[in-house]
Image (cartoon, coloured by chain):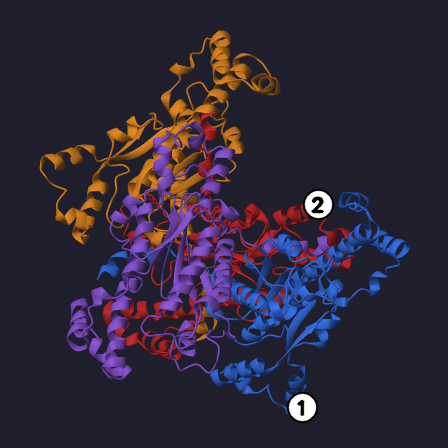
Chain colours: A red, B orange, C blue, D purple
Amino acid sequence: MANTEFGYVRNFEVHDSIAPSNWIVVRIDGRGFSKLCKKYHFTKPNDKRALDLMNAAAAEVVKSFVDIVVAYGQSDEYSFVFHENTTLFERRREKLSTSVATMFTAEYCMLWPQFMRREEGDERFAEKGDVIELERPWPTFDGRCVAYPRCRILRDYLKWRQADCHINNLYNTTFWNMVLKGGMSGTEAELELKGTLARDKNEILWSRFGVNYNAELEVFKKGSVIYRDLGVEDRERKVNGDGGGKAATEGSRSQVEKERKRKLKARIVVEHVDIIQDAFWERRPWILAERKGGG
Amino acid sequence: MANTEFGYVRNFEVHDSIAPSNWIVVRIDGRGFSKLCKKYHFTKPNDKRALDLMNAAAAEVVKSFVDIVVAYGQSDEYSFVFHENTTLFERRREKLSTSVATMFTAEYCMLWPQFMRREEGDERFAEKGDVIELERPWPTFDGRCVAYPRCRILRDYLKWRQADCHINNLYNTTFWNMVLKGGMSGTEAELELKGTLARDKNEILWSRFGVNYNAELEVFKKGSVIYRDLGVEDRERKVNGDGGGKAATEGSRSQVEKERKRKLKARIVVEHVDIIQDAFWERRPWILAERKGGG
Amino acid sequence: MANTEFGYVRNFEVHDSIAPSNWIVVRIDGRGFSKLCKKYHFTKPNDKRALDLMNAAAAEVVKSFVDIVVAYGQSDEYSFVFHENTTLFERRREKLSTSVATMFTAEYCMLWPQFMRREEGDERFAEKGDVIELERPWPTFDGRCVAYPRCRILRDYLKWRQADCHINNLYNTTFWNMVLKGGMSGTEAELELKGTLARDKNEILWSRFGVNYNAELEVFKKGSVIYRDLGVEDRERKVNGDGGGKAATEGSRSQVEKERKRKLKARIVVEHVDIIQDAFWERRPWILAERKGGG
Amino acid sequence: MANTEFGYVRNFEVHDSIAPSNWIVVRIDGRGFSKLCKKYHFTKPNDKRALDLMNAAAAEVVKSFVDIVVAYGQSDEYSFVFHENTTLFERRREKLSTSVATMFTAEYCMLWPQFMRREEGDERFAEKGDVIELERPWPTFDGRCVAYPRCRILRDYLKWRQADCHINNLYNTTFWNMVLKGGMSGTEAELELKGTLARDKNEILWSRFGVNYNAELEVFKKGSVIYRDLGVEDRERKVNGDGGGKAATEGSRSQVEKERKRKLKARIVVEHVDIIQDAFWERRPWILAERKGGG
């Protein structure tokens, strides 16, 4: 058969499975988003609607991949954490990153009209209607997998992203106040901010613009963390003496299936809280809990 | 600064650049498309509107990545071929596959209303309007990169896909005629088709259903090939003695930029023709032509 | 310069660094050792001299790579464990495996005359002298790196090798008693042993040949484990309140150098003991202890 | 069985097969050879005995791997080229590099006494005998695989190595003449040579030391190339109309076996000639000739 003759080309495909017992982060990043922000007149330094859209898209991704235990997002990026024991797509790198990135992209595009509406009195848009119409090039996101061999290192990864959010947001908030309210040019503001510390920026905000950085929205300062609220059930299970039995530890198939369903039903939570300190994790022990087998 | 402390987590990212001088195929595949076909009542064995949608999405992808020299699609898959010398994204595997897959996904979702309209007299849809409304889960596509070290092997890859298209289409055409017109059950049709050769299927189609397979639409039988029509300009350049000069062979920066612009302006062609034989390639020598440097 | 023109070929080399915070096992295996065993009339089922040679070669390898924390060997294989924080050769896979495998090979070849001597009364050798002369093909060993993301999994790896040693040795001891003392053919012995459990083999050994498996040499039953005896100093350091100070935790350069020297001077120990149970590791806590930075 | 419980650790091993249709170069490099050169008083700038030893070791490696089509060596490095179609060790990267590197190391150590003999009147050695006795650390070699997707690029790789040989040798020859005959310090010679062109070095050699660089030994200037002399038989086969028949093109198993034997018997040639120009390759067309299948 003709096709057997050419089938040898399959041998050029690579095995790109990520080693077992590594937490897998799929991070997606907006492609060309600085252009996109300008084109659709995103509010500076933060566009609340755009962040809500990011979060809504991410929540749908978390919802449909039960092996994602937590996600963290800020600006135009989102990190999705797959449990270290996931066997999804045989842990194949490209399958994971393309599946997550395309689902996120589809959600972002399809949810756009729900979130990106013209704000009262905003005269920048020609359209009559109140939806900001999306045009080509459509928003897209690239993605990559990173494997973390230890829970502690994964948490450092998440700390890194949240610290990055804080640093950028403080800078951007100060910069845009200097430009929009202070009437400085971008270059002037940049020059003045060079080498300043956090307290310097806080001081500029307060003394010149009366802005208390601490009073800024948490979603701007902390970014967003998304997870399944399995807490209630966890507590119930403990009361009933359930969940610690033989079936659970053996990870029997029916148990795995039951778990899957429990997760599918669980409420997806979006919060803007500190994930650098231990408190967040200690109060939600199920998020990074060990699990038997894939699933 | 806090962030330097955690920045070490970047060292876990992998270098996944594809070796130079390899043609790079990014193949995208519909995720869960058999379910999707059922949900939206795609016509069997081929839904012309859905194929047109695939082709329109693919054409946009080809348009925006100037280093894609040719693309081939059939059913719910598409293969995009990047020139062996591309330096896009430093040839990083995941960057290439996620960028192509997300753009394709965005195009597919956004172009859907233009293509997926209710056909005259089709009573299967509840909606009053004539657009088949897209619902969650949105259509998405996974993607993977494969590197081919030789033009000849790349062409074998494309032959493989087109031969696959032919085999599947002949089978599906016969199967669905047996089921839809012949009143057989799926299992019965499957059983009878087991082990049959191409001529047997042609015979079933003709003798039982009066169907001449050769008269089927070319897009069904051959799939779709997309490329830039640089032929006219190529011929003009030859007449003018242009394009073979020092600048061209040296791949100077301005020349590269000029080439890029030429490609951006070029007409994107979608055809349903044989790419297994040499003729197609011989008549369009620019498609797989050598190029200096990336670009 | 001519060489710059061709230097682009370096771009085809791959980055094969192993991700940080993974324990790295380099396992070497004798190439074509069943032939070699026959050629030099190795004693069956175990040749004590050959195992001593393996151990002597491995001890030299451990000695010269201070980042190897432990090694385990049996039959014609040896596993060398590099500390999870090693930065040797930038953790490059092929550098690590070829450097270990070639050093082991050199040691094995050069130490051969010291270990492989004709035993008293052994008439199988033509040579007059008492050294069994090595001939081409020289003994060589292939090697591979495996990365383990957790100490517990690394220990499972070592358990796997020692369990393998036990299983093979019990089988081989029984098989060769049946053949050499019992006068059975290889095929007959194989047939009888098929499906037998450990206790069946013990029973065959004892009832037919008066062999008490438990009395066999520990090196045969347990294989060999090699490590640095840093225990005494560890205890001394504790008494002196040394080693826990600021310098140690900071991994300062001079501290790292001091550590290196301490390891270079440490006694290399070769033992034939159980490493499956916890006891071995609990009594030698320094072997798998955490360390700051590369070491 | 205990071992099944731990067997999961095998899942951490990586698939590292090199893509088909790529030429595979295994390059080995002496580890710590500048120290070794000093220790054993290698002649500067070139030690003929040491190069002869390298070549003898390499010839044995070529002899035992029939899929090595050509090897090129200079200084303390050697590159072994496996045919693009080799299926040896399933083209696994580490298997190839460790197998070649350990065999080379074993040969180098075992052949040492044959080549490294004290030269007449050389008083630097304490030993009475005329063999320079090898001591620990034994000479070892690291190794790496590089895949080249095209014959032309592979040839550029070999050109790169031979150009490198020329450049280094001209420099070293000049440098050591300046130091050994000219009485300059190393630093002085280095300083003077900085920025000089080839003709400047030739001039220094000739005018100051009466050395005609062109008259230097070819093995110093060109390095060494090793291959199988299949030429005679090739010609014979053509005369007999053999070798082009059906069996050959089909790569039938018996034909492959016949080929293997032919190669095993072929004379191994070591030459010191130009491989940068086409002439070398045109006269020995069998070296880089295409072959069906692995083998």
Left or right: B73 in relation to C110: left
Question: Crowding near pointer 2: few (<14 within 10 Å), some, many (20+)?
Answer: few
**Amino acid at dot 2:** Arg
Q: Nearer the viewer, mark 2 or mark 1?
A: 1
Please give the name of the residue rendered at 43% of the width and 32% of the height, measured from the top-left corner. Answer: D248
Instruction: Pick whichever, C31 or D191, lies toward us.
Output: C31
Instruction: Pick whichever, A293 or D20, lies toward us.
Output: D20
Compared to residue C245, the image places residue D49 above or below, namely: above
Residue B214 in sight: yes
Q: Quadrant of residue A167?
A: bottom left
Q: Quadrant of residue D233?
A: top left
| Position of residue A5 measured from the top left corner of the image (x, y, whole percent) | 45, 30
**Amino acid at dot 1:** Val
- SS under mark 1: helix
| Position of residue B214 measured from the top left corner of the image (x, y, whole percent) | 39, 15
Left or right: C280 in relation to C149: right
Q: Residue furthest front?
A: C128
- SS under mark 2: helix
According to the image, label 2 marks what residue? A253
Chain ID for label 1? Answer: C
According to the image, label 1 marks what residue? C239
The residues bearing labels 2 and 1 have C-alpha atoms spaced at a distance of 53 Å
Q: Residue furthest right?
A: C207
Please give the name of the residue rendered at 15% of the width and 33% of the height, measured from the top-left corner. Answer: B235
Task: Say whether marks 2 and 1 touch (CB < 8 Å).
Answer: no
Q: Residue furthest left?
A: B240
Please give the name of the residue rendered at 66% of the width and 56% of the height, measured from the top-left corner. Answer: C37
Chain ID for label 2? Answer: A
Compared to residue D83, the image places residue A172 above or below, namely: below
Left or right: B245 in relation to D293: left
